[in-house]
Image: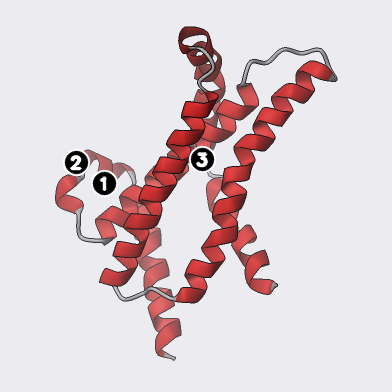
Amino acid sequence: MNRYFQSIMSLESIIKPANVGAGFVGAFLGPFIMQSFGNGKAWAFILLIAVMIADWITGTAAAKKDESYTSEYGIRAVPRTILMLWFPIIGGLLDKVSLSVFGINQPGYAFFSITIMLIYHTWESMTANAYRAGWQQWIPKSVTSFVGSEIKAKIERANRQKDGMSK
C-alpha cells in the first residue's frame, strides 16, 4: 500500500511553473480550438495517451541503457499513469459542473488547462528519457537545453536507483 501512496505523491513534479504555464496556455487556447475545429477534447486526450506511451517507451529504453530499471519502480508508475489519465476527466467534469451548478459556461477551460499541462509535462519527460536512452542525435540542441533540468533530474534519480539496487 505504501508504494501506491508514494507513486501518487510523486505527482509533485507535475506542479512546477512551466507546467502551470502550459496549463494556462491550454485554458486559453482550448475554447478557440473547440470553436475552430469542433470538440477537440477527444483528440487532446488521444494526444495525451500517445505522448504517455512514447514516454513509457523512452523511459524503458533509458532505464535498460543505464541499468537503473527495477520492476518496483515500474509497478509504482502504473497507478501514477492511471491517475494522470483521470485528471482530464476531472477537468471535463469541472467544466460541466460550472455550467450546470453555477450557470457559468466555460467551454473546456478546466479540461484543456489540465490536459495540455499534462501533455507538456509528459513531453518533457519523454524528451529527457530519449536523451538518457542515447537518442540525443535526434533531438535538436535547443530542445535538450530547454529540458536540461528534467534530463539532469532523471539522471540523478537513475543513479540513486542504481545505488539502491547495488546495496
The amino acid type of the residue labelled 2 equals Pro
For the C terminus, which image quadrant?
A: bottom left
> How far is disc 1 from disc 3 in space, using C-alphas?
19 Å
Pointer 2: what residue? 140
Label 3 vs label 2, nearer the camera: 3
Whether residue 106 is situated above or below residue 146 in the rendered picture? above
Whether residue 100 is situated above or below residue 2 in the rendered picture? above
Residue drawn at (39%, 43%) of the image? 123
For label 3, the SS is: helix
Label 1 vs label 3, nearer the camera: 3
Can residue 125 be seen by looking at this rendering? no
x and y percent of residue 67 in the render? 31, 76
Residue drawn at (46%, 35%) of the image? 46
x and y percent of residue 128 in the render? 33, 53
> How far is disc 2 from disc 1 in space, using C-alphas?
7 Å
Count neighbours of disc 2 (C-alpha within 10 A) and say few if under 14, some if 14 to 19, many if 20 or more.
few
For label 1, the SS is: helix
The amino acid type of the residue labelled 1 equals Thr
Residue drawn at (76%, 13%) of the image? 104
Label 2–label 1 contact, CB within 8 A: yes
> How far is disc 3 from disc 2 in space, using C-alphas?
22 Å
For the N terminus, which image quadrant?
A: bottom right
Residue 126 numbered tag: none
Pointer 1: what residue? 144
The amino acid type of the residue labelled 3 equals Leu
Residue 118 numbered tag: 3
